């Protein structure tokens, strides 16, 4: 999970060859489903769920 790595939308887009607007859509969906207060909490949650090891 690249959000968990602390990458920005621009950095994520470059690393997985998506447009920045596409990344924003996916990040918005993740945040809406996980319901964290912010992007940092989503990253913390990714670490807590061991999603960073996958």
Image (cartoon, rainbow, N blue to C red):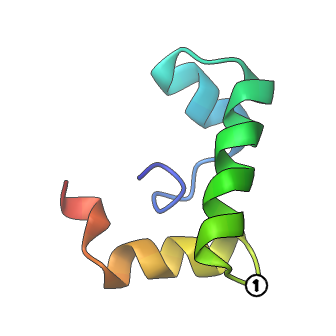
Q: Where is residue 35 in the image (x, y as percent from the top left)?
A: 68, 79
Residue found at x 61% / y 58%: 30
- In the rendered view, tell whether residue 24 sits above or below residue 7: above
> Which structural element holds mark 1?
loop
Query: Looking at this rendering, what residue extends furthest in the front direction?
Result: 33
Query: What residue is pinned by disc 1?
Result: 37
- In the rendered view, tell whether residue 18 sits above or below residue 49: above
Q: What is the number of callouts on the image? A: 1
Q: How crowded is mark 1: few (under 14 residues within 10 Å), some or many (20 or more)?
A: few
Residue found at x 47% / y 49%: 2
| Snapshot quadrant of residue 47 | bottom left
| Quarter containing the C terminus | bottom left
For this view, does 39 lie left or right of residue 34? right
Q: Position of residue 14 (x, y in %)?
A: 58, 21
Residue found at x 34% / y 85%: 48
Q: Position of residue 29 (x, y in %)?
A: 68, 53
- In the rendered view, tell whether residue 37 sits above or below residue 11: below
Residue found at x 62% / y 34%: 11
- In the rendered view, tell whether residue 28 sits above or below residue 11: below
Q: Position of residue 18 (x, y in %)?
A: 61, 18
Query: Looking at this rendering, what residue extends furthest in the left direction?
Result: 53
């Amino acid at each position: 999970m690249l959000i968990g790595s602390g990458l920005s939308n621009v950095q994520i887009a470059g690393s997985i060859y998506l447009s920045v607007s596409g990344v924003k859509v996916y990040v918005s969906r993740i945040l809406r489903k996980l319901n964290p207060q912010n992007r940092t909490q989503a990253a913390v949650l990714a670490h807590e769920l061991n999603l960073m090891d996958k």
